[in-house]
Image (spheres, rainbow, N blue to C red):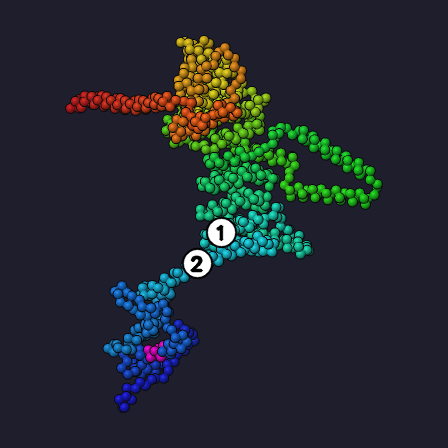
């Protein structure tokens, strides 16, 4: 018992609360007092600090801070008891499951482990079994450093999850990820349902639920791109439905100070909320339109709003964004913008023509800013414009009629006032009634977007001037690119010359609106078209050595536009079109079926040769000869268009039928030029009357039956027969029919064609058609003959290709021989120099 009493621990009294050195404040007066009375402080210097420390920290067999550990252990046991009483579970249920490590062993997270993790392990080990360690007392500086270190480690552990804990609890990490996914999906579904509820409420009763617009605009600022797109499209449907048919004008400060009824106050709140939300929505669209992820959705919303409500507020911003993307590289965005602008041009009743004028001006500025380097669709929208036919006529008659109507109205008013009795009250009442009527008419006119004749005429004049300004700028840019082109070969030219993508739609627009061009610009326009049709040379005799900037199709379009302008302004112009005939004569030779457009060639032949007046005999014969010659090289469609033109010219010009004679020395009427010059650049100097149309004999054996029939028909025309009836088939129509025929022709016919011959039914059974004759009959052409013609044709093509290949090989061989000869000469010259040096 005595030993047990000796081993019993005698606890010292409780220590005073320890105050950190940082919190101790020493004043200047205390320091001064200590310095003045140092003699009284000798007691502190003689104190035995070691004995005091031993007395304070004495514990039986203690080698460490056992006293502090004892206090901490007691507090920890009490806390654990309280937790067990309150919850009964110390760890999570998932963490209590066994965990298998990489070594194959199972670990259990028990309450003891949780306790060990909560408390510092060093203290427990020191208390339990580290008896060999001596007693160490930390100083205050060491304690402060230890506390700072523990705080830093705690912060790091709060930010980063320890690797050991992650390895020990993979189930909790997976469950946390699943929980996050579930929460994001739930948030997404809740936002979608909220958008649907708000949109449905606004569409059901917009006046009562107008405040929900701000909530929908706020959802469009979400971080999820899918929610943003859904919000934009939902707001688009709402605004498209609730926007009124008039522009909203917010009340002024004076109007706000006035006392109004409850209905007016409610309407003002509704309009102001709608306008502010609409403005915020448009600002969001303009911001997202610059981002590639949201560009298509934003542009779709902008175009839909502009198409549905071109009269409403902020239409200028919508129109600016639409025109800015009208030449986008994205095809879907470009088509959206172009279709919206075309809708504005065709439906001017929605906006009264103001948006049309503004759109045309913006397109003109865009063409100017980009130096005519835009997509062709950006100015093809001009073809959807419509103008009054009398827009180009003078306005003198309209002004006289308006002045007369105004004068008559004033006279009637004066007569009515004179007939009234001299009563000031009645006169004032009449004046107020007339003033009220005028105000009502003005408001009705502003609301209905109806314009006067003079206002409409002015708007159309502004639109037309902007359109022609754009067209003339494109022509000037093309002329400048042709004038500054380098005089090099064609390969280097294509790499240095600036492209002109807007030239073709510009020519189409000039051809459509040629009857509205001012007469002051006609002369300059015809001169520019003449230069452009020649490919850049001012003279008509443009050689093939000079590289051409424009294609054959574009130069043909220049000739077509010149003839359209001339025909629509025949009374006011006196222009010689001989140069354009020279250009057409040369362009027929430069035409290639696969490279150029056959429709443009057929239209040029129709307008310049078929629909024109009587031509000179020498010029007509030259065109007939060249078209017949090149029909051998063209495809079936182009050959048919050329033969239709030849037939039309021969029917109009009887003397040119001498080309059909089979004389050895040419036709009977040779003209001033006795010999035919096939490569002449001028049709008047070609001497075509001295030749014979021997090409018709070859074309009569063409593999296509329609072409062979047409050539045989032309050959059978007699000089004596004066055929006045012209062919109704135009070159464009013949080209179209032959193109359709080629598309419908397929190899599955196998030389047989179904005939649908309708015969009259008679009562006689002998006359009734047999079933064999109505089913499938043999074709009108022989299959063996067609096979022979095709075989000879493709044999000729193969020979031509083989000949070209051999010529290239011969050229290479001759070039290598020439180089070898030059090398031998240089070697012989260098030998005497070496001997002289030696």
Instruction: Point out the image quarter for the N terminus.
Output: bottom left
Residue 319's x, y, as percent?
A: 54, 42
Closer to the camera, 371 or 700? Answer: 700
Q: Which residues are magenta?
A: 69-76
Task: Please indicate whether residue 800 sits to the left or right of residue 188 in the image.
Answer: left
Closer to the camera, 612 or 4? Answer: 612
Residue depicted at 44% across the width and 18% down the height: 711
Provide the secondary structure element on which disc 1 rests: helix
Residue 54's x, y, as percent?
A: 30, 82
Magenta stretch holds residue 72: yes
Between the residue at mark 2 and the residue at mark 1, the CA separation in whole angstroms equals: 16 Å
Q: Which residue is labeled 2 in the image?
A: 184
User: Where 194 sits versus 751, above or below?
Assistant: below
Q: Which residue is labeled 1 in the image?
A: 230
Q: Earlier in the sequence, mark 2 or mark 1?
A: 2
The total of numbered circles placed on residues is 2
Mark 2, other Cα within 10 Å: few <14 / some 14–19 / many ≥20:
few
Magenta stretch holds residue 306: no
User: Where 725 sits versus 410, above or below?
Assistant: above
Residue depicted at 38% across the width and 76% down the height: 84
Task: Please indicate whether residue 548 sits to the left or right of residue 506 in the image.
Answer: left
User: Where 426 sits versus 471, above or below?
Assistant: below
Instruction: Point out the image quarter for the C terminus.
Output: top left
Residue 302's x, y, as percent?
A: 52, 45
Residue depicted at 49% across the width and 54% down the height: 221
Residue 85's x, y, as percent?
A: 40, 77
Q: Main secondary structure of the magenta part?
A: helix
Provide the secondary structure element on which disc 2 rests: helix
Q: Is residue 49 visible?
A: no
Closer to the camera, 36 or 814? Answer: 814
Image quadrant of residue 571? top right
């Amino acid at each position: 018992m005595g030993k047990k009493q000796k081993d019993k621990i005698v606890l010292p009294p409780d220590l005073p609360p320890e105050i950190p050195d940082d919190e101790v404040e020493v004043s200047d007066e205390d320091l001064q007092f200590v310095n003045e009375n140092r003699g009284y402080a000798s007691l502190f210097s003689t104190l035995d600090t070691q004995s005091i420390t031993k007395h304070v920290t004495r514990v039986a067999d203690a080698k460490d801070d056992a006293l502090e550990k004892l206090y901490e252990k007691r507090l920890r046991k009490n806390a654990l008891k309280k937790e067990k009483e309150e919850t009964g579970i110390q760890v999570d249920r998932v963490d209590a499951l066994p965990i298998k490590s990489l070594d194959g062993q199972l670990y259990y997270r028990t309450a003891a482990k949780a306790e060990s993790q909560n408390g510092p392990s060093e203290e427990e080990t020191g208390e339990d079994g580290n008896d060999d360690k001596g007693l160490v007392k930390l100083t205050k500086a060491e304690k402060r450093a230890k506390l700072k270190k523990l705080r830093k480690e705690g912060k790091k552990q709060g930010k980063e999850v320890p690797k050991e804990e992650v390895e020990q609890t993979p189930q909790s990490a997976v469950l946390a990820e699943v929980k996050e996914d579930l929460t994001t999906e739930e948030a997404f579904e809740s936002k979608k349902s909220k958008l649907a509820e708000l949109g449905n409420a606004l569409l059901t009763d917009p006046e009562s639920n107008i405040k929900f617009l701000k909530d929908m605009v706020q959802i469009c600022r979400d971080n999820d791109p899918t929610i943003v797109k859904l919000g934009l499209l939902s707001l688009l449907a709402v605004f498209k439905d609730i926007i009124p048919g008039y522009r909203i004008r917010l009340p002024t400060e004076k109007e706000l100070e006035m006392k109004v009824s409850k209905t007016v106050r409610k309407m003002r709140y509704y309009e102001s909320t709608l306008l502010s939300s609409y403005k915020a929505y448009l600002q969001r669209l303009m911001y997202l339109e610059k981002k590639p992820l949201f560009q298509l959705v934003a542009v779709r919303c902008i175009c839909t709003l502009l198409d549905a409500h071109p009269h409403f507020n902020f239409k200028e911003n919508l129109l600016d964004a639409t025109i800015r993307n009208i030449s986008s590289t994205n095809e879907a965005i470009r088509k959206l913008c172009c279709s919206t602008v075309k809708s504005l041009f065709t439906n001017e009743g929605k906006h009264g023509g103001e948006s049309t004028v503004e759109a045309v001006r913006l397109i003109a500025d865009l063409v100017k800013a980009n130096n005519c380097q835009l997509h062709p669709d950006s100015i093809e929208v001009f073809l959807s414009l419509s103008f009054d036919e009398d827009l180009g006529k003078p306005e003198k008659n309209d002004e006289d009629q308006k002045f007369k109507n105004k004068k008559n109205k004033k006279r009637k008013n004066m007569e009515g006032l004179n007939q009234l009795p001299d009563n000031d009250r009645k006169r004032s009442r009449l004046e107020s009634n007339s003033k009220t009527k005028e105000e009502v008419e003005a408001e009705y006119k502003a609301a209905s977007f109806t314009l006067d004749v003079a206002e409409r005429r002015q708007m159309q004049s502004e639109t037309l001037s902007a359109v022609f300004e754009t067209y003339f700028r494109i022509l000037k840019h093309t002329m400048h690119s042709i004038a500054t082109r380098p005089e090099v070969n064609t390969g280097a030219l294509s790499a240095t010359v600036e492209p002109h993508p807007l030239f073709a739609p510009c020519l189409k627009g000039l051809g459509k609106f040629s009857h509205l061009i001012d007469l002051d610009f006609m002369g300059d326009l015809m001169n520019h078209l003449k230069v452009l049709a020649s490919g850049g040379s001012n003279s008509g005799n443009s050689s093939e050595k000079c590289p051409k900037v424009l294609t054959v199709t574009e130069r043909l379009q220049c000739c077509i536009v010149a003839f359209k302008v001339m025909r629509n302004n025949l009374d006011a112009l006196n222009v010689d079109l001989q140069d354009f005939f020279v250009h057409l004569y040369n362009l027929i030779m430069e035409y290639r079926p696969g490279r150029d457009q056959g429709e443009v060639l057929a239209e040029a032949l129709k307008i310049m040769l078929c629909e024109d007046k009587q031509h000179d005999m020498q010029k007509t014969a030259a065109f007939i000869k060249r078209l017949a010659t090149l029909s051998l090289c063209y495809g079936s469609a182009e050959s048919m268009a050329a033969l239709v033109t030849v037939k039309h010219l021969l029917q109009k010009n009887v003397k040119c039928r001498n080309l059909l004679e089979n004389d050895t020395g040419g036709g009977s009427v040779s003209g001033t030029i006795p010999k035919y010059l096939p490569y002449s650049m001028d049709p008047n100097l070609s001497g075509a009357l001295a030749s014979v149309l021997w090409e018709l004999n070859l074309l009569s054996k063409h593999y296509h039956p329609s072409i062979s029939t047409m050539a045989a028909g032309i050959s059978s025309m007699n000089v004596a027969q004066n055929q006045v009836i012209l062919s109704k088939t135009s070159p464009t129509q013949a080209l179209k029919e032959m193109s359709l025929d080629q598309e419908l022709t397929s190899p599955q016919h196998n030389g047989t064609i179904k005939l649908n011959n309708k015969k009259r039914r008679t009562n006689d059974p002998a006359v009734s058609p047999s079933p064999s004759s109505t089913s499938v009959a043999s074709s009108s052409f022989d299959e063996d003959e067609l096979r022979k013609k095709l075989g000879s044709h493709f044999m000729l093509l193969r020979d031509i290709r083989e000949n070209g290949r051999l010529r290239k090989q011969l050229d290479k061989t001759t070039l290598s021989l020439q180089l070898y000869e030059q090398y031998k000469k240089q070697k012989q010259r260098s030998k005497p120099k070496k001997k002289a040096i030696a």
